[in-house]
Image (spheres, grey):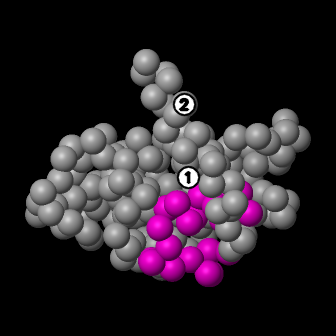
Amino acid sequence: MRVFGWVLSFGMLSAGAAWAEPCQTLDELRADQDARHLAGAVRGCVADERYVDAVQTFWAYSNFALFDQQRVRDESAHVAVQELHGWIFSGYSFAIIGELKKVIAELRDPDGVFLAATCRGVAKAGPPEYRPTYMIKRGMIPRKTEDDWMVDGFDATAAWQKALVEINGCPVGVVN
């Protein structure tokens, strides 16, 4: 049953292949673009064979999603990120995956210029400013009001730093 539930839920999300977004650069990143939008932009970049933009947009998506997971109190809703991950990277040929891996390898260099530039671009957009509806809707805990989705005492600045630096490894001096 557990696997069936994931497949059903994933199928509902992936049915939105039409919501693939146009590719974008980090310079176009805005704090009002939710993680679901950025996931679609990653697929748009891959479709355009813009692998550097795809990986950088994925990095932005990852930071935005990690931020959202920290502010949405219903942890069952966090499954939305796993579903988006599956959708982002599904259906590509080995050749495309190989191209993406080359760029990812460059991003993983903790002392690299590419990581610093990518982190700087994401940090410049600032912490997300949207309501994470894509995640809130996935939650299983009954809600009493429209505004009871957020963690009590949520600190956006601390959550943004945690996403960028503690979890994704951006150099501290680059994002401050």
Q: Which mark is residue 110?
A: 1
- Callout 1: SS: loop
Q: Quadrant of residue 28?
A: bottom right
Q: Quadrant of the N terminus?
A: top left
Name the magenta segment's main secondary structure: helix
> Residue placed at 27% from the left, 70% from the top?
157
Front residue (pair 25, 107): 25
Side (left or right) of 146 relative to 60: left
**CA gap, disc 1 to disc 2?**
35 Å
Q: Is any atom of residue 52 visible in this view?
A: no
> Residue placed at 19% from the left, 47% from the top?
142
Which stretch is magenta?
Answer: 25-44
Q: Quadrant of the C terminus?
A: bottom left
The amino acid on which the numbered mark 1 sits, given as a three-letter code, is Pro
Q: Position of residue 173 (x, y in %)?
A: 42, 69
Q: Position of residue 71 (x, y in %)?
A: 26, 59
Q: Is residue 104 above or below residue 114?
A: above
Mark 1, Cα crowd under 10 Å, few <14 / some 14-19 / many 20+, is: few
Mark 2, Cα crowd under 10 Å, few <14 / some 14-19 / many 20+, is: some
> Residue placed at 63% from the left, 48% from the top?
15
The amino acid on which the numbered mark 2 sits, given as a three-letter code, is Val
> Residue placed at 47% from the left, 67% from the top?
34
Residue 29 is a magenta residue: yes
Q: Position of residue 75 (x, y in %)?
A: 27, 43
- Callout 2: SS: helix
Side (left or right) of 96 relative to 151: right
> Disc 2 marks which residue?
7
Q: Position of residue 20 (x, y in %)?
A: 68, 62
